[in-house]
Amino acid sequence: LVLNVDSDTEIDSDVVSKLVRKMQNPAVGAAMGQLKASNRNDSWLTRLIDMEYWLACNEERAAQTRFGAVMCCCGPCAMYRRSALLLLLEQYETQFFRGKPSDFGEDRHLTILMLKAGFRTEYVPDAIAATVVPDTLLPYLRQQLRWARSTYRDTLLGLHLLPGLDRYLTLDVVGQNLGPLLLAISSIAALAQLALTGTVPWWTGLTIIAMTMIRCSVAAVRAGELRFLGFS
């Protein structure tokens, strides 16, 4: 087994044993732990990112692992089966997109390769890793842009996987890719309506607010922490 840990990440003392326990199933090619922000208390942004990590791990990844197909085993803390890595190493090292070498999103790309090779990918919620997150807005936005490019690129590379996965996973992948675009279009259309007609787009605003509050309320209940209401 090979454990990948980012240089700015600290893992709990029992992370290795908990990930190894999951890897005892030979069908599992990769498993990731739960990520938290080690510098959570540095700024308002790091507090939000810490909650964002909780949502990504304990809603998105936790749902995907029920079907053995976590779509991205995140780089800060992930364990891989060495024999599977050796099978995929050449594809992984020669990562191209539209004919050009690609040097971002390597964790998502390797996860997709694992799924394409027929291995399961899993999430282990009690294997805790604390990683340093951006504490100012510009580095955070750069990071998000890299991750978004990786998400769209590897979704294209893995589209043919979807028919063989559970229908929920297909819905999940479609939602991940279309959701942000639909939100952006809705917001732009609402601003255009306000500017051109002078009327307030109440239904657009109320729908976005309602969906946000529902998601954050569910997280607040599940995590048992009211701070998630502030995430909205």
Image (cartoon, grey):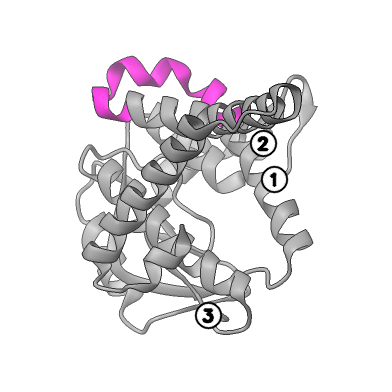
Point 24% across, 41% down: residue: 27
174 magenta-colored: no
Q: Is residue 151 above or below residue 178?
A: below
Q: Position of residue 6 (x, y in %)?
A: 59, 68
Disc number for residue 38: 3
Point 63% across, 73% down: residue: 7
Q: CA distance from mark 3 to mark 1?
A: 21 Å
Q: Main secondary structure of the magenta part?
A: helix
Amino acid under label 3?
A: Ser
Q: Earlier in the sequence, mark 2 or mark 3?
A: 3
- Answer whether residue 180 is visible to the viewer in this image: yes
Q: Mark 2 = which residue?
A: 149
In the foreground, 88 or 229: 229
In the foreground, 153 or 212: 212
Disc number for residue 86: none
Q: Secondary structure at mark 3?
A: loop
The span shown in magenta is 152-169
Please rate how many residues cluster around mark 3, counting C-alpha atoms within 10 Å: few if below 14, some from 14 to 19, many from 20.
Answer: some
Q: Is residue 176 above or below residue 129?
A: above
Q: Position of residue 114 (x, y in %)?
A: 42, 37
Q: Is residue 85 above or below residue 98?
A: below
Please rate how many residues cluster around mark 1, counting C-alpha atoms within 10 Å: few if below 14, some from 14 to 19, many from 20.
Answer: few
Q: Position of residue 28 (x, y in %)?
A: 28, 45
Q: Position of residue 50 (x, y in %)?
A: 49, 69
Amino acid under label 1?
A: Arg
Q: CA distance from mark 2 to mark 3?
A: 25 Å
Q: Secondary structure at mark 1?
A: helix
- 2 and 1 marks in contact (CB < 8 Å): yes
